[in-house]
Image (cartoon, rainbow, N blue to C red):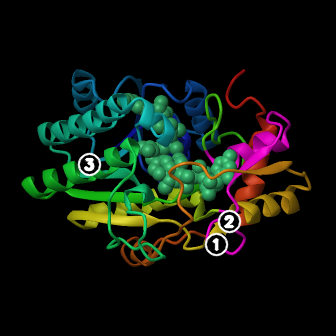
Amino acid sequence: MILVTGGAGYIGSHTCIELLAAGYEIAVLDDYSNSRPEAVKRVQEIAGKTFPVYEGDVRDEALLDKIFKAHDISCIIHFAGLKAVGESVSIPVEYYDNNLNSSLALCKAMKKHNTTRLIFSSSATVYKDGNPMPLDEESDTGCTNPYGWTKYMSEQIFTDAAKANEGWTIALLRYFNPIGAHASGKIGEDPKGIPNNLMPFITQTAIGKIDKLQVFGDDYDTPDGTGVRDYIHVVDLAKGHVAAVAFCEAQSGVHAINLGTGNGTSVLEMVQAFEKVTGVSVPRQIVARRPGDIATCYASCAKAERLLGWKAEKTLEDMVKDSWFWQNSNPNGYEE
Ligand code: NAD
Ligand code: UFG
């Protein structure tokens, strides 16, 4: 059985569906601090299968003990964590506490219960600014905010633990910018409060919840002056995890792997793609750069293709279409 921490969240819920479709048995552990039980319910509906769900904190070692005793956990996919870059600057201690202590608690549980495989949600944010593009796994690392450091330090924790425990296999999956939603329109990204990321801002502007999209800077050294990112469809990302589970069954050691598409898209290109696909206009205004943003960030995905036999397949149009379908079908997210 695979233990999915943070399985009620945005990427976790999509991954649960792909794991179940691939025939894996799963259990979910989530404290619903940034998600709702409704997401898990919908995963079960889409998959036509049920699975054990534990409400609680990954840092709760007694709860982990209970879960590992109740099930034969062969692999952990560790999504749970706090993820808002700006918030991490305001409440760094909460970020270090949640994200690092959950990694440590899982290492202890793995050792105690002889689980040898773990897949960790890392991020492109571990790469230092100033690297040549595309970023490959050998690019220089280093962070500019507490959230990024929690990913960087968790990678180090898992790497050292794997060195000390023979037979452990760790995949450090460095995601680029996940967007999109399941094609059913039943699950998707449901940010609480004001969104942090571009796509929810676009869809909430298009639906009229937000007056105008603020484009953070048009004076970057990019073709149209706006920031360029590597957006990846969340279902492709989810399938990357299924490939990583199989990879970890066959390999040992620690492997950092980028999951992106290898394509860069600017903010204005994304807005134009959205307007073209949906026929809905997105009022926008250019404002100052957002502190901490970089001009360009996109991945080399050669290693993922080589090691996992995985490659993103969905297009920018798919990402936009599915994000819009989700937003339109659920104007208030999972809220009743
Ligand atoms: P999300 O917030 O939707 O999902 C995280 C889930 O973890 C939530 O359901 C939340 O309730 C749960 N959680 C948080 N702390 C917990 C704890 N201590 N115990 C139990 N559950 C806990 O976020 P997401 O976008 O699905 O991201 C999943 C992972 O991927 C995170 O680790 C995130 O840092 C990482 N990541 C996300 C992005 C992105 O842009 N979405 C990019 C790179 C990396
Ligand atoms: N942007 C806007 N207006 C908005 C929101 C974003 O112009 O309202 C721009 C940003 O300036 C940037 C691009 O859209 O150029 C993408 O911004 P996001 O906030 O969607 O994504 P980031 O690349 O800044 O950050 C994301 C995740 C981080 C993760 C990082 C690298 O939010 O957690 O990707 O993987 F660390």
- Which amino acid type is marked by label 1? Thr
Q: Are marks 1 and 2 in contact (CB under 8 Å)?
A: yes
Quarter of the image containing the N terminus? top left
Q: Compared with residue 4, is residue 97 higher up or lower down, i.e. above or below? A: above
* Three-letter amino acid code at the position of disc 2: Ser
Disc 1 vs disc 3: Cβ atoms closer than 8 Å?
A: no
Residue 327 lies, in percent from the top left, at 76, 41
Report which quarter residue 302 is drawn in: bottom left
In this view, the residue in front, 62 or 68, is 62
Dot 2 falls on a residue whose secondary structure is strand
Where disc 1 sits, the SS reads loop
Which residues, given as a range, are shown in magenta? 197-226
Toward the viewer: 114 or 171? 171
Q: Classify 10 Å Cα crowding around label 1: few (below 14), some (14-19), many (20 and above).
A: few
Task: Name the residue: 53% across, 60% down.
Answer: 294
Task: Confirm if mark 1 falls within 8 A of ligand 2.
Answer: no
Residue occupied by mark 1:
222
Q: Quadrant of residue 109?
A: top left
Q: Which residue is mark 3?
A: 153
| Helix, strand or loop at mark 3 | helix
Of marks 1 and 2, the one in the foreground: 1
Q: Is mark 2 within 8 Å of ligand 2?
A: yes
Residue closest to the eye, 204 or 238: 204
Q: CA distance from mark 1 to mark 3?
A: 31 Å
Quadrant in which residue 98 is drawn: top left
Count of marks placed on residues:
3
The amino acid beneath tag 3 is Met
Residue at the spot x=75%, y=66% of the render? Answer: 269
Q: Which residue is mark 2?
A: 266
